[in-house]
Amino acid sequence: DTEVTQTPKHLVMGMTNKKSLKCEQHMGHRAMYWYKQKAKKPPELMFVYSYEKLSINESVPSRFSPECPNSSLLNLHLHALQPEDSALYLCASSHSLAGENEQFFGPGTRLTVL
Amino acid sequence: GQQVMQIPQYQHVQEGEDFTTYCNSSTTLSNIQWYKQRPGGHPVFLIQLVKSGEVKKQKRLTFQFGEAKKNSSLHITATQTTDVGTYFCAGLNSNSGYALNFGKGTSLLVTP
C-alpha cells in the first residue's frame, strides 16, 4: 500500500464550527506533514511529526491543532477558522525526517470557510 | 531565510516542443526534489537529486543539479498533452531543519 488517504475530500464550515481533518498511511513512514495550499501557489508547510512527536510548527495560528494518535494517523483539528483559511489541506508522509526521502502526498481536503 | 526561486511561472507550448523550468536557491542545498501536480490533483514525487552536478533521466525528462548545489533544472523533450501540470522544485537545507522549501512552480500548458 503506497497511498496516503485523507478524509473528508471536501469540507464547508462556518467560522464557529469545530471540525477535524484525517490522514492515514500504512507505508510504515515515521514522518508525517500537514501543508496548506492556496490556488496557484506552492504547498506551505504547517506541521511536521516525527515518530509521533511534533517536530516542526511553522508558526501556525492556534485555531489549527494537529494530533498524531499513532504512527499511521494524523489529524488536524479546526476551530474558529477565518474565510482566508479556505484552501486545499494536504497531508504527506515520508520514510523518516532525514530529508533525503520522497514525500507521498494525499489527495487533500478542500476546505471552504464561510 | 532560504528561498527557492523558480522560473518561468507559466509556459505554453505546442505538443512536440521542448520545455525547461529552472530553480535557484540563495543557499547551498542538501538535496532538491521535483514534484508534479496535475490540475485538481496533488503533488506527486518525480525525483531527488543529491550530488553536485548530478544528472538523472526519466524517459523524456532530464533533471540536473548544479555544481554549487544552488540551482536545478527540469527539461522535458517533445512534450505531450499528458505533461500538463505544475512542476515544483523543493529544496532542502539541512541547516534550517528538515522542511522542504518549495519553489512557486511552473505551470505547463501543452496544446495539441
Image (tube, grey):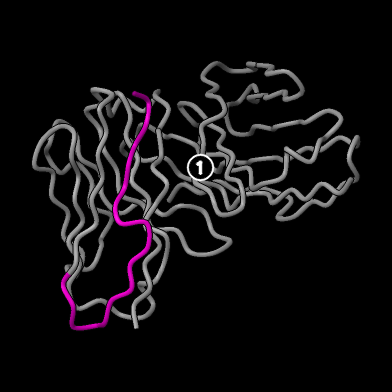
Q: Is residue A96 above or below residue B13?
A: above
Q: Is B84 on the left or on the right of A78, as rendered?
A: right
Residue drawn at 87 percent across, 47 percent down: B13
Rendered location of residue B78, percent (x, y): 87, 30
Q: Which of the two residues, B74 or A22, is positioned nearer the viewer here? A: A22
User: For residue A15, what is the image quadrant?
Assistant: bottom left
Q: Which of the two residues, B80 or B69, is positioned nearer the viewer here? A: B80
Q: Is residue A92 above or below residue A95?
A: below
**Label 1 neighbour load within 10 Å: few <14, some 14-19, many 20+:** many
Q: Which of the two residues, A48 or A5, is positioned nearer the viewer here? A: A5
Residue drawn at 37 percent across, 50 percent down: A90
Q: Is residue B66 above or below residue B82?
A: above
Total count of labels: 1
Of all chains, the one bearing label 1 is B
Amino acid at the residue labelled 1: Pro
Name the element at disc 1.
loop
From which residue to which does the magenta span run? A1-18
User: For residue A25, what is the image quadrant?
Assistant: top left
Q: Is B86 on the left or on the right of A69, as rendered?
A: right
Look at mark 1 in the image and give the residue it sits on.
B43
Q: Is residue A33 magenta?
A: no
